Image (cartoon, rainbow, N blue to C red):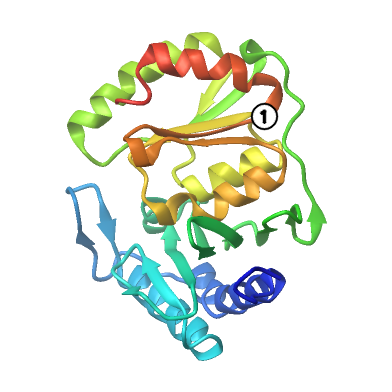
Amino acid sequence: MTDAGVDLHDLLAVADTAVDAVVPRLAAATDRAASVDTKSSATDMVTEFDRWSEQTLVATIGELRPDDGFLGEEGASRDGTSGVVWVIDPIDGTTNFLDDLPGFAVSVAARIGDDIVAGVVADPVRGERFRAVRGAGATRDGVAIRCSQAADLATSLVATGFSYDPERRRRQAEVLAEVISQVRDIRRFGGAALDLCAVACGRVDAYYERGLGAWDTAAGGLVAAEAGALVDDRQPAGGAFVAAAPGIADALHPVLERAGAHSA
């Protein structure tokens, strides 16, 4: 129970209910390229499924908690009066979704003040669901998860992502060229929420990316942190979002600094 009188596990249950309302259709979608528009660039795409998913998530949560606020990637915005704001990414990894690739997810998180307090990330392809409540740990399909025990950066697997802006992508490629020589290998899956969940369950040892939205990292960042990863969010100051296994965090951060990851 928070100071605002909100049971965080109740918020998690609301997030689960909302995700249940959209995952089956997204998993079964066939005509995914219908009504595709672009946003910040020609490679930053949004589909009718993104819009439908966000509208359905907002409507489902709104029925259960009518006084809450919303912040959604596709434009949902409401202040609310309860002190709870839902941060929503209706399809994180839209490019993967469009091209019938794995690696897209639905991300729903509850924020109170500046703190993300509950979150759900659902993977419609794998059928996995990651959940976390602040201070209560993280799970995958109901089973507790922990980040990797990696202790050597040179043998660690690191995930990252790239901006939709062509110039920023060029600079990020330069950063990548520096980082890849210091780690075992790099993975680029195409969705921040699942990348962070991959850190949480030890599939990768770390993740970094700059230029993300609050909805990209809200639920996944909480899942990673509650699974024991060290999360460093420098986005408010213009830097990157980093999540890493504790055993390599101290070695990874200087590498990212020297490579310019917080400015690319």
Q: Quadrant of the N terminus?
A: bottom right
Q: Secondary structure at mark 1?
A: loop
From the viewer's side, name the closer residue of 48 and 71: 71
Given residues 251 and 89, the one toward you in this image is 251
Amino acid under disc 1: Ala
The answer to whether residue 108 is seen in the rendering is: no
Q: Which residue is the extreme one toward the right?
A: 143
Label count reads 1
The percent position of residue 111, horizontal first and vertical second, equals 51, 63
> In the figure, residue 198 lies in which quadrant?
top right
Q: Position of residue 35 (x, y in %)?
A: 24, 70
Tell me residue 12's x, y (percent): 65, 70
Q: Is residue 195 above or below residue 150?
A: below
Residue, far front = 3
Please state the horizontal and vertical placement of residue 208, each as a whole percent of the image: 47, 31
Looking at the image, can residue 154 be seen?
A: yes
Left or right of residue 187, residue 214 in this image: left
Q: Is residue 236 left or right of residue 138?
A: left
Quadrant in the rendering for residue 117: bottom right
In front here: 223 or 160?
223
Image: 142 above or below 68? above
Residue linked to disc 1 = 245
* Residue depicted at x 38% and y 14%: 259
